[in-house]
Amino acid sequence: MSFVADRRTRALGLIAVAVALLLALAGVPATSAQGTTINALYSSDAVPADDPFSPRWDLVRAVAVPLSGQVTTQPMLPVANVTGVDVRAMTDGDRLAIMLEWQDTTRNESVLTADAFADQAAVQFGLGEGASICMGAQAGALNIWHWKADWAADLASMREIEAAHPNMPRDEHWPAQSPGASPDPLGPHGFLSGQMAGNLRSLPRTSSVEDLTAVGFGSLTAQPADRQEVQGASAHRDGRWRVVFSRKLADPDPTDAPLATARTFVVAFAVWDGARGDRNGQKSVSNWVALGIPQRPLGLLDGWPFLVMIVLALSLAGWMLWLGARQPAVGLSGPK
């Protein structure tokens, strides 16, 4: 190979590196992953976290995730009642929203009687390399976002057992109030042990999604009320549920999924059909799938170090081409 040709080859290599950097700045990926990978769409506008049927969700490619029965622990579900769920994800650089959509001809949002079960859905994030899909493990915990249709209905109007049994005896107000007394600071029902204990199922609803952690069977634990960071929105239309889970990317809680720092997660999904008696472990579940969260696209000012590198690389390539053009076309071994 001649000295000039060698210089030109190096110059072309530098130009290729510069072009790759330009493509990266423009947001063009060098490779594209295939298979069951859910890639969140980056949106320059705020994500439609409170509107499951926003037209903007239809701009996001849905990934069909198959569901199967749960046969690991009681109560089991050998055959899935919900065979699949469509998953979409979107982020605006501040908040991540995940939407699940599945077919369900009935809308079940009451648990006020012993034989009533609500529709539910959940997203679980694997934390650590040793995370087991079966409620996690000590080597890898889970962060679970659990949406409940009855909680969503309670946000509009908190319903109590009297709604299902209107003729039941009324509970005594404690402490007792005399006629004409000022309103009880504890509320219209007085002292309620569940609320006083901070039980999330007794407190007034602030979200339709419960934020939980798990490190193995029997360890599923709701996070404290002041650390419930996940919001939910849901709607049932034309025999289908759409449920949106959303949370800010930045979250200092070490038991939550580190959405602000990690770019890829393993996630799994579960759906309960209340009309068919699904509850607890009786649910339709998926295997692990990948979830990719894109970073905010870099602008020209954000990428100034790369621009400097590109200018230097192009300048060096131009100098080498100019220098090579001034050299005689003679091979390294001398004239023949």
Image (cartoon, rainbow, N blue to C red):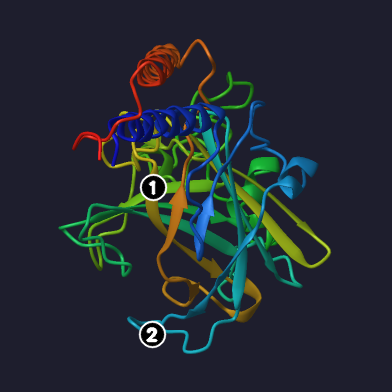
> Dot 1 corresponds to which residue?
264
Residue type indicated by callout 1? Thr
Q: Is residue 335 left or right of residue 57?
A: left
Please determine whether, in this image, residue 315 is positioned above or below residue 186.
above
Tell me if label 2 and label 1 are in contact, CB under 8 Å.
no
SS type, badge 1: strand
The spot of residue 266 in percent (x, y) is 37, 56
Residue 280 appears anywhere in the view:
yes
Residue type indicated by callout 2? Val
Outermost residue toward the right? Answer: 238
Which of the 4 quarters of the picture holds residue 236?
A: bottom right
The spot of residue 222 in percent (x, y) is 35, 49
Outermost residue toward the left? Answer: 139
The spot of residue 22 in percent (x, y) is 50, 27
Mark 2 vs mark 1, CA separation in Å: 28 Å
Foreground label between 2 and 1: 1
Q: Which class describes the residues within 10 Å of circle 1: few (<14), some (14-19), or many (20+)?
A: some
> Dot 2 corresponds to which residue?
71
Residue at the image position 75 percent from the left and 41 percent from the top? 56
Nearest the viewer among 299 and 290 is 299
Question: Residue 228 has which mark?
Answer: none
Residue at the image position 44 percent from the left and 11 percent from the top? 304
Quadrant the N terminus occupies: top left
Please determine whether, in this image, residue 110 is positioned above or below residue 105.
above
Please determine whether, in this image, residue 51 is positioned above or below residue 87.
above
